[in-house]
Structures are given as C-alpha cells and as structure tokens.
Image (spheres, helix red, strand yellow):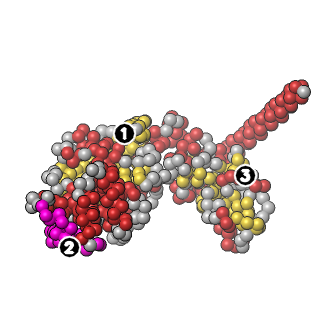
Amino acid sequence: MLEGDELIESFWNICLLHDISSRDQLLREAVRVIQTRRMLEQQEAANLTLLEPEVLFRWMKDHAGERELGHFPGDRDLFYKLYQAGKDIDLLEYALQTLQQDRITGGIIVHSGIMDRFITMCNRHGYRSFLITETEKYIRGLVDTQCFKQPFRITLLTENYIIAKLLKIYFEPYHNVSVIQGSIYHPLPLTEKFEAILAIPNFGIKMDEDDDVIIRDSEGVAVNHLIPLMEDGGKMSVTFPARMMFQSGSIATWRKQTNELVPVCTINLLPDGLFRPYTSIKTYQVEFGKSPSEEVHLGRLQLQKMTLITERETTIHPEQFGLLDNWRIDMLLDEDQDSLQAFQQATVPKVRLRDVADIFRGKSILKQDLKAGTIRVLNISNLEDGEVILDQLETIDEEERKVKRYEILPDDLVMTCRGTVNKLAVFPKSEGVVIASANIIVIRFKSTILSQYAKIFLESPVGSTLIQSFQRGTTVMNLNPADVAEIEVPLLAKEEQLDRINRYAQEKERYKTIVRDATARWEQVKNNLYTELY
C-alpha cells in the first residue's frame, strides 16, 4: 500500500498523463476526489458497489459539486484511477507539494519559522483569534506547526477560489477554523476583528487605488486594509522588502502615518532562504500593535536547523523611533554602531547626495553587444583598489548621441551597484567616450562636495554601513540610484575637504611605494636563493 509522498507522486503521474498539469488543475482534481470520498462516507457507502467505475463516476457528478469544481476532464475510467490513487491523500500536504512544484504561476511559500514565531507571539500575549492572509503562502507553516490543533480560533484567507475550496474541505472537521475568500488589496467586508494578523503582501506591485490615498504600493495598501481588522491590544506581523523600510516620498509618508496609527513594536531582519522560490532581496518582519509598547525591539534573525533565533538584538524608545525618517534597523544593529552613532549625533552639518549631485545608473549591455567600436564601457571588473583601470575597458559599436546620457566625465564618482563587493573610484581624464554599464552608478557632484572627499567618506566604516543599509539584496548587492541619493555625507568647507583629500593621497602613495619596494626586494631575494640552489 502506498503512503504519503508515494500517493502524491502516483496521483500526479496519472494527472500528467492526461494533460492535467497546471497548479489549479492538479489541486482541483484532488479536491474532487476527496470531496467524493467525504460524500460517500457521509452516506456510509464507501465500501459498497458504488465503487464500480460507472456508478462512482455518476455519484461524483451528482454529489461532488461539479458546478463548483467545473467539468471533469476525462471519463469514468480516469476518475476511477484518480479516486483509487488519491482518496487517502493528505490534502494539505498535497497542496503544499503541488504549490512548491509550481514553476509557471509562481507564488511564495514561506518558511515555517515565520509561522512558528507568530504562534509563539500569540501564546505569549494570550491571543486566541488570528487571521492568516493569503494562506497558500503559509501552507508550510500550517503543515509543520499544526496550529489548528491548538485552542485557537483561526481564519484562513485566500484570493484563489480552488485553494479556498481545498482549505474548506480539509478543515471541515476542525470547527475552530474558518476559510474565507477575499483580497487584502481591497477593503475586506468582515465584521469580525482579530487579536493577531499574519501577512506577507505581494512585493513591488502598484495598485489601482483612489486618488486620495497616500500609497499605491501593494505592501502598504494591504496593511491599510488590514488595520481595521485588528482588535484593540492586538498585533499584526507583516513581511516587507527592503525598499519599504527606507524609500522616501509616499512610502516615507506612509511609514510615519502607519507608525502613528499602529505603532511598530518589533522589527527583525530576516535571513536568506526563508522563501520558496528563493528570493535574494532583503526582507524584514515588522510587528505593529494597536497600542504603544514601552520599547521597540530591533533584531537580526538567523536560521539554525529549522528554527529562527535572534542573532543580535537592541531596543529603542518609541518616541526616538518615531523621530527616525526610515526603518533601516541594519545600522542600529551594526557592530560598528558606536561610530555610526557618533556620526549621526555629530554637530557637523550633513547633506544628502540628492541635494548635491546628479545620480544615474549606466546602460544595460548584453554580452553580444560587446564588439570592436569607439564607445568604451566601464564595468565592475575595471575598478581595482579604488581606481579605474582604463586600459581594460571593453567597447561597443554605437552612435555617440544614443549613449550620451550614460557618459562618465572626469571627476565623476563611480560606484558598483551589483555584485558581491561594493567598489568606489573617481573617474580620471580619458580620451574618447566612456559610458557606465548597468552595474555602475555614477555620482556627478556639484560645487558643494568634492568627489574624492565623498569617496573617502563612503569607503569609511560609517559610509560602508550607510551604503549597506540601502542594499535591497542579500548575498548579491542591489543598489538603486534613488536610494543612494538618500545617503548623508558630512558637509565640510572646501579647504577642509581638500586637506583630507591631500592627506589621503599622500599616505596612499607612500603605502604603494613601500609595498612596491618590498615586493621588488622579496622577488630579488627569492631569485638569489633559487640561483644558489643550482
């Protein structure tokens, strides 16, 4: 007798042989089989002659909701095979594996550690009613935590009709679980309120909202629609991408107003590997409360085996948190926090890059575009030890007027925005046109800030921390020009900037001379020793 994964594999194989292959088709036919079995059990007919192919097929059509599930894509023999293969399947586990195998329609499956921490939070506060939104994303957590077997009143929300049907059938024996169909990107017509809400909204989608709304980003829209469903004293735990934590404009306004309405209680930087399919963007778990907390807890989580544990943690007073113009907790958790704090509290005036420079990203150039031509291209590999290596630039054959907007001029500060290491260099004088690739951000300063001075600051421990805090990626760096524009640099008088530039240049030249002499001496000594051997 087949069990567990073998049952699921067998059911899939039958479906695929009969062109039943999409995610929703695979889910629908499993639901049809389980619903038929349930109806037979209710009629105490599961072991009767109804199991003959023709009678079973007719029973399914008459009693198993063909109006709800649509026309069955086969004949009586196919349904009989599917019924025999799938009647003992665990429908929730089947749904999880089917969603995980989906490569076409996509969709995120969240690591169960998120659900586990959410359940722990509910138990700690004595919450007994909670809402899980877009439940298909948390199906791994449902399977692993089995939270529906605890004394909670759980509401599962999904926008997908067939997933809602599947959940209703699976949780029919659990009277503490209810399933509703609806979207968190529109007002939810629910009268019930919840002590806790768990959500991971879709990332980076612009919603078609009314003209008078503050924010159109899907993450903010979802939170706005969920806030009215929170009980007094309740909490909402939401996963956000990095840009929601620091982007300016409408998102900054939304952060401020949301924190005033439902104050932030906790922010945790999440580790890699929590989502399937894998996403390389930074993510944060933010916990909002209907009432202010005495402290805002900030932490960095890591994955140990299958459990999320706190790697580093600090606290900040809610009033102090409210004064922050962003939620970039990376800086507050940084090991070099003392230097950063000293910079932030220093009386020296500071200025944002966007106020003193024009900033743009280079041109996207495919490998096949690289060919003999007059336009040279600066890429990551052309930056070494803080300098531009001009004699290694590749070229493209393109009209100058078409790439003029990407041209790098002498004294521009260039910065890598992709890759694994952040590199900075001041572009020197060169002949001909050189443009930046899409892996490079160009910062062209006005008269206020000198590019060499800005480079020195940005490569310092504080500057590096500031750059890192704006990265949207995790293992692979991903910087956006608009985000880089928000970085603050200390505004010194021109004479002071020049003083630092000259001291830096002199010491670097001295260092290079000493290294060059030491290298030459070492090579000479080695060669002399080798010669003595023979």
Give the magenta-colored segment's residue range: 48-74
Name the chief secondary structure element in magenta.
helix
Q: How many labels does the image show?
A: 3
Per the image, is 73 magenta?
yes
- Between residues 120 and 186, which one lies in front from this camera angle? 120
Q: In which quarter of the image is residue 207?
A: bottom left
Mark 3 or 2, nearer chain start: 2
- Farthest residue, direction left: 43
Q: Where is residue 357 in the image (x, y as percent from the top left)?
A: 61, 58
Quadrant, the C terminus: top right
What residue sits right under mark 3 in the picture? 388
Q: Dots 2 and 1: beta carbons under 8 Å?
A: no
Label 1: few (<14), some or many (≥20) within 10 Å? some
Residue at position x 78%, y 64% in the image: 432
Q: In which quarter of the image is residue 72?
A: bottom left
Q: Rounded to the nearest whole Å, what is the CA distance between mark 2 and mark 1?
A: 43 Å
Label 3: few (<14), some or many (≥20) within 10 Å? many
- Dot 3: what SS? strand
Residue at position x 69%, y 58% in the image: 378
Q: Is residue 490 left or right of residue 120?
A: right
- Between residues 348 and 508, which one lies in front from this camera angle? 508
The kind of residue on which mark 2 rests is Arg
Above or below 242: residue 56: below
For discs 2 and 1, the disc positioned in front in the rendered view: 2
Tell me if I can see residue 228 in this picture: no
The kind of residue on which mark 1 rests is Thr
Label 2: few (<14), some or many (≥20) within 10 Å? few
Q: Where is residue 287 in the image (x, y as percent from the top left)?
A: 32, 47
Residue at position x 18%, y 60% in the image: 37
